[in-house]
Image (spheres, rainbow, N blue to C red):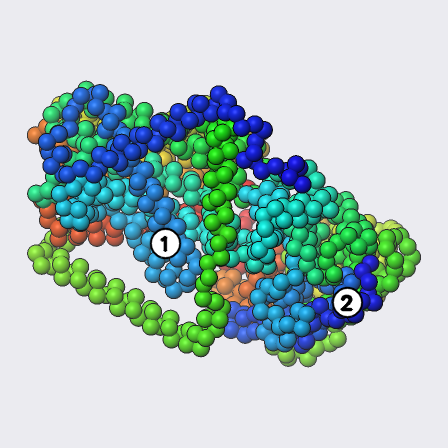
Amino acid sequence: MLERAPPNALGRSLAPNLFDVAALALVIGALVTVVYGAHQTDVPLTVLDSTPISLDPWRLPGYALRTTLRMLAAIVASLVFTFVYATLAAKSRRAEMVLIPILDILQSVPILGFLTFTVVFFMNLFPGRVLGAELASVFAIFTSQAWNMTFSMYQSLRNVPKDLEEVTQSFHLSWWRRFWRLDVPFAMPGLVWNTMMSMSGGWFFVVASEAITVGDTTVTLPGVGAYVATAIKEQNLPAVGFAVLCMLAVIIVYDQLLFRPIVAWADKFRFEQTASAESPSSWLLDLFRRTRFLRALATNVAATIESTTRIRIPLPNFPKLKFQLNVSGRLIDAVWIAIIFGSAAWIGWQVINFISATLNWSDVQTAFIDGVYTLIRVTILIMLASLIWVPIGVWIGLRPSLAEKVQPIAQFMAAFPANIAFPAAVALILHFGLNANIWLSPLMILGTQWYILFNVIAGATAFPSDLKEAAESFHLKGWKWWRFVILPGIFPYYITGAITASGGSWNAAIVAEVASWGDQKLNAVGLGSYIAKATEAGDFQRVVLGIAVMSIFVSLFNRLLWRPLYAYAENHLRLG
Amino acid sequence: MLDVADASATAALIDLKNVNRSFAKANGDELVVLEKVDLTIVSGEIVGLLGRSGSGKSTLLRIIAGLIKPSAGAVSCRGQAIDGPPRGIAMVFQSFALFPWLTVLENVELGLDALGVAKPEQRKRALAAIDLIGLDGFESAYPKELSGGMRQRVGFARALVVHPDLLLMDEPFSALDVLTAETLRTDIIDLWVEGRLPMKSVLMVTHNIEEAVLMCDRILVFSSNPGRIAAEIKVELHHPRNRLDPTFRQLVDSIYARMTQRAEPRPAALEGIPGTGVGMVLHPVSTNVLSGLIEAVAAAPFNGRADLPVLADRLQMEADELFHLSEALQLLRFGMLSEGDFLLSDAGRAFADLETDERKRLFSQHLINYVPIISLIRRVLDERPSHSAPAARFRNELEDYMSEDYAEETLETVISWARYAELFAYDEKAEMFSLENPN
């Protein structure tokens, strides 16, 4: 029987081929860099002070490695969090009641505002070690990545096809086995896509979190972000240029070596019954698939991992447990809800106490007025970016050969941490003596506008050609064509991009509304600068107030504007 | 076939006594899906559950599979009460239910996953099942690379590999095209007759009358609302059965007649029974298809009276689909069902000869006269000064009588029929009925 379907691991021959050599070099190289980088984090904090950041461009690859490792650590943490949190929320109704609203709020909390507390917290956890500062930075990236990954996983788990669920039941799969054979594979495509999006967003925060000042504590972690911060202090524009180039290279390498292979591999988990015309490919994955030795190794490792999912973990018999409690099920619900609201009220009260210790109503008012300023900025910027990028995106998207070339660039621009380029803009504003209140604003959308562009391109590319032809044959042109043909066609895509862009802009406000170049400081009135200044001063009350107000603004903005628009787009304008 | 004389074979494999199943409706009432179902399955037989869609036969199958619990009654498998999926029962799904990320071989092995079979043994049995069902050579393919028929073969292999006592099949051929379905049916029956299939008995759900007669030893005809076993028919024909055999045709005809029989009149005041007054469940049937059917029956060779199996064959329709259509026409008094035949009424014959606008007028008259929910909506719209009313008002009223899904379907049907008849307009975004048609 074995002759007919030999296990993949056996291969045709065990002799390594040329691909093996190349692949092996890559693997060993990756291992060495990880070990080296990890070793660097376990040194005393004083080392950071004795070896300040050098602007020598040859040091940049080393810095970039440290930055990249932080990203990796954060993504691993995010994945672990996602698996636990999403599973808990999807499988337990009572946990869901609490976990999902919390996740919803966490999504709208400005990530950079977190830094203030986490830096202090982690530094106290590992006093005198670099590890504390590293963890604070990793945590900042984590908070920028975890929420949307968790949401994606949760939604997948809630939408597992009924018939497959019945198969696992009727063939008596244990819950552990079912989790790995059904739940996780089903969630995989969404999770991979969201992880990729998270990584794109993450570069921004890793750069922002490497050089932080909270009150008297200043942390400068070796990395590209700290390099840029030093360049700003020393007004070294060429160094900023080197950092930009280095970041470009890092993102390309990351994409090619990590994400392309994963996306290509995850393609098999897509839940569709027909083969799609085009599936993503990766040269690296192809390389590894062609190697004999490595493929054999991978299959064996996979088989070992797979067999661990067969372990039947003895669990208390859930149905029976539920049956016993059924009588008082409603009572438990009531108690549970009472506990939730009780603790929420208590925590809310504590927060108000904390804030009102030093602040009063006029401070709240100031924060809200600043919030309105930032709101106006975000709104105007999104409108401007839409006016510019929607026509361009449509133009590109309708030309497939062009779209194919531009789309990766647009996605790449979205991943590029715009804050690295801020100093150049600041230098210009200072040089021409422009109004900071107006001219600092574009920085907020510098990095996030690309989400609008690449989503619109995707929408225009996916626009059905029969509709295009129909419009053409009925001589629909000019404004009519935009109004009745293409704009409704791309609207769902545009909304997706605009939501991401607007969320990112709120976050960016914290680093964009305050900028400096050497000892010259620029300041725009807004909630972002309010939080940034409070952080620098170590004024925790104001930071909490600022974060709370921004969370409220973002939540309301999402609920009152984006969600209805998104629902409308999904219900009325989704094609196919 | 298997040895029926064997003593253990006569013992009941599955025994259902007085099984009821109901679901909660939106307003808190119970919607009864299954009522007083008794069923026994012994070794060595293929039993068919034949009924209209929505008659609760899939629910019954899932109760036997241990996936759904009955609301009342006793269900046992080899004398043991069923609590959760019992060992020795495997299922084939209408939608195939294959894992797209697993290869054919892995999908089949999944069936053995929880049985604690050693890996080499697992592989051996999986390959044997794949071999048996004619999937040789496709072991390492992914489901999306296969055609529908091949995919369902994987579904069969996955169920057979566990060597079940009872194989449950939930409309296994209805997602396949006619030709593929026929090939697969024949293959399964051939294997069964040759005694090469590892299971002792088969229970299949279907709405296809010919399929049931072709495959089953015993057919249980289900009535709808609530689902009950209305008749039991033994099929004594020898395999391989011939569809053109007069006995075969006769049997099909008689089942058609039985399934189109009007249910015995029910007390109209009884709450919760769909089919009367405003609470009538309407199935979404396009007015285009209705007109088409009227025209087809009015024309030669039927000239106003059509034998349902012949009509189904001619129009390339499933019996179930044809039932829905002819019942809609019966409801609108354009025709009537009797003894497995469909007869056009005078109004139906008139309709066939009219022009579009006149057809619409006649159709709207019949809607007002014979569809209570439509006359209600029209009356409300006439009475209100604004001549508009939210759909929610009528949806709520419908949900007093039926499940949310049926209410939605009924409303959908009302909207499409009323639009055709130009009785009233509906704004989907605002979810409002109104008398104003856009100019």
The residue indicated by pointer 2 is B9
Q: Which mark is residue B180?
A: none
* Residue B384 at x, y percent in the picture: 50, 66
**At x 38% / y 71%, what residue is drawn?**
A333
Mark 2 — on which chain does it sit? B
Q: Which mark is residue A85?
A: 1
* Residue A384 at x, y percent in the picture: 30, 34
Residue A537 in view, yes or no: yes
Tag 1: residue type?
Tyr
The quadrant of the rendering that contains the C terminus of chain A is: top right
Could you say whether the residue bearing mark 1 is in a helix, strand or loop? helix
Toward the viewer: A532 or A125?
A125
Q: Quadrant of residue A76?
A: top left
Toward the viewer: A491 or B345?
A491
Up/down of B240 relative to B346, above or below: above
Q: Quadrant of residue A256?
A: top left
**At x 38% / y 41%, what residue is drawn?**
A195
Local crowd at mark 2 within 10 Å, few (<14), some, or many (≥20)?
A: some
Mark 1 — on which chain does it sit? A
* Residue B180 at x, y percent in the picture: 74, 44
Local crowd at mark 1 within 10 Å, few (<14), some, or many (≥20)?
A: many
Tag 2 and tag 1 share a subunit? no
